[in-house]
Image (cartoon, rainbow, N blue to C red):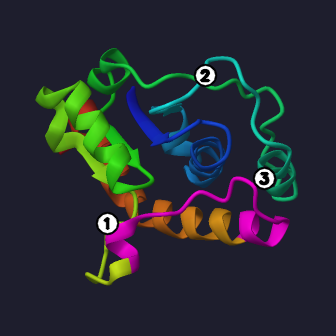
Amino acid sequence: MIQVLIVCTGNTCRSPMAEGALRSLLPAELAAQVRVLSAGTNAVPGVPATPLAVSTTGSRGIDLRAHQSTSLTPELIRESELILGMEPGHVARARELAPDAADRIHLITEQGADGAEASRSGIHDPIGGTSVEYDDTFNRIRSHLLRWLPLIREAVERREGVR
């Protein structure tokens, strides 16, 4: 079993949407081998996902109603094979908390990035935005997660001794 950790600020919209999206994207043969979690660099523990995050994912068959926010900790980082931050500040904070895991901490937009400014700035927070902004954020997250799937597969295969 490998663990993927997705990080944003409050752990109430971007990272929970990404957590649900990644779970839905994992093929059956990987789903049982990958634990997906999310956390926030400034999260208040136990806060539910925002109503727009719940409705945005719900319209895609992803249920976030039971989500409770979690604070980012060095332990969560160290227990994870892959840590994906939504913005450069999330990556920096995770690396600060667990410098020994720095090589496993990445900006979600870096995989397959073309060097464009949007790739370097990550995925901006839709909090306080409209349903259209949440939809756009979800679609961007999902498209970037698709680029990470081959690396997740490789990590599972390495863990199982296939590679």
Task: Tell me the quarter of the picture where residue 80 sits.
Answer: top left
**For this rendering, which residue is in front, 162 or 100?**
100
The disc label shown at residue 57, or none: 3
Mark 1 residue type: Gln
- Residue occupied by mark 2: 44
In percent of width and height, residue 69 lies at 63, 26
Dot 2 and dot 3 residues touching (CB under 8 Å): no
> Where's the N terminus, which quadrant?
top left
Dot 3 crowding, Cα within 10 Å, few <14, some 14–19, many 20+: many
Circle 2 sits in a helix, a strand or a loop, which is it? loop
Circle 1 sits in a helix, a strand or a loop, which is it? loop
The residue sitting at 42% across, 57% down in the picture is 149
The residue sitting at 61% across, 22% down in the picture is 44
Q: In this view, does 132 lie above or below 88?
A: below
Q: Give the range drawn in magenta.
A: 118-135
Q: Earlier in the sequence, mark 1 or mark 3?
A: 3
- Label 1 – label 3 distance at C-alpha: 23 Å
The residue sitting at 73% across, 28% down in the picture is 67
The disc label shown at residue 111, or none: 1
Q: Earlier in the sequence, mark 2 or mark 1?
A: 2
Task: Tell me the quarter of the picture where residue 51 sits.
Answer: top right
